[in-house]
Amino acid sequence: MTRRTFHREPEAVRQQDLIAATLDSVAELGLAGATVREVSYRAGVTPGLIRRYFDNKERLVAAAYKSFIADLIKAAEAGCGDGPALSRLAGLIRASVTAPVADGRTLSIWAAFIGAVHSDPVMAEVHRDGYQAFRDLIERLVAEVMSERGVALSAVEIHRHAIVLNALLDGLWIEISMGGDDFSRLDVDRIALDSVATLLGIDPTEFRD
């Protein structure tokens, strides 16, 4: 466990330091272990400073979960790159099933947070907004892919594809992040790309290119 040295920083930077310390605590100790005292120690500040920015642990945890989801989406979106929609969708898929999006630490943090989603309305809202943002990204890419290929699909059909594709990626992400032997011996990129290609009615070899 590393304790940061206190430095006077702008308020936004200090809040991000506290969120980073919270995520580190959650990854190692779970949600119950991420106490105000633990987070303040890791951040190198007093517990009172946390309450100044976040009022209580619940608000700090919600802010950490929001930041966590946003960072995952950014990392996946960064894999899109430029080029045709099919290439960008393939990049998103690859990024979604490889580190840093898919790894043990990320899964541990997510699993700790997800337990609070069904009991805490604030966490539930953060969860809903974050997942909606990722599904919206997938839906836009699917719509662009189909448009490029001259395939006419209704908005309802595109939405349905996005929901199923998101569920597929979620399942692969969990399995890969758990680090099971079955997946360690497989080409997870190819599995993910072939599965999505089948879902969208695209030749898998074309999709991988």
Image (cartoon, helix red, strand yellow):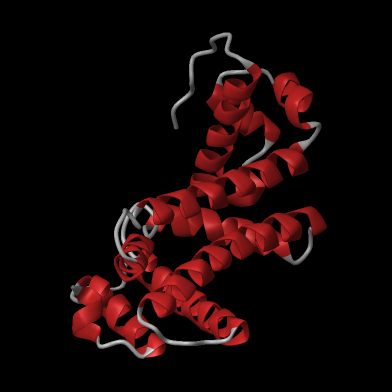
* Residue 133 position (above or below residue 64): below
Which residue is at a point 74% across and 61% down the rendered structure image?
Answer: 124
Which residue is at a point 75% across and 20% down the rendered structure image?
Answer: 48
* Quadrant placement of the C terminus: bottom left
Counting from the top left corner in percent of width and height, residue 40 is at 63, 26
Q: Residue furthest front?
A: 150
The quarter holding residue 43 reads: top right
Which residue is at a point 79% across and 35% down the rendered structure image?
Answer: 56
Q: Which of these two is toward me, 57 or 137?
A: 137
Counting from the top left corner in percent of width and height, residue 60 is at 70, 38
Whether residue 181 is visible, yes or no, is: no
Q: Is residue 144 left or right of residue 80?
A: right
Q: Which of these two is toward me, 98 or 46?
A: 98
Q: Which of these two is toward me, 102 or 2?
A: 102
Whether residue 112 is visible, yes or no, is: yes
Counting from the top left corner in percent of width and height, residue 66 is at 63, 48
Counting from the top left corner in percent of width and height, residue 47 is at 71, 23
* Quadrant placement of the N terminus: top left
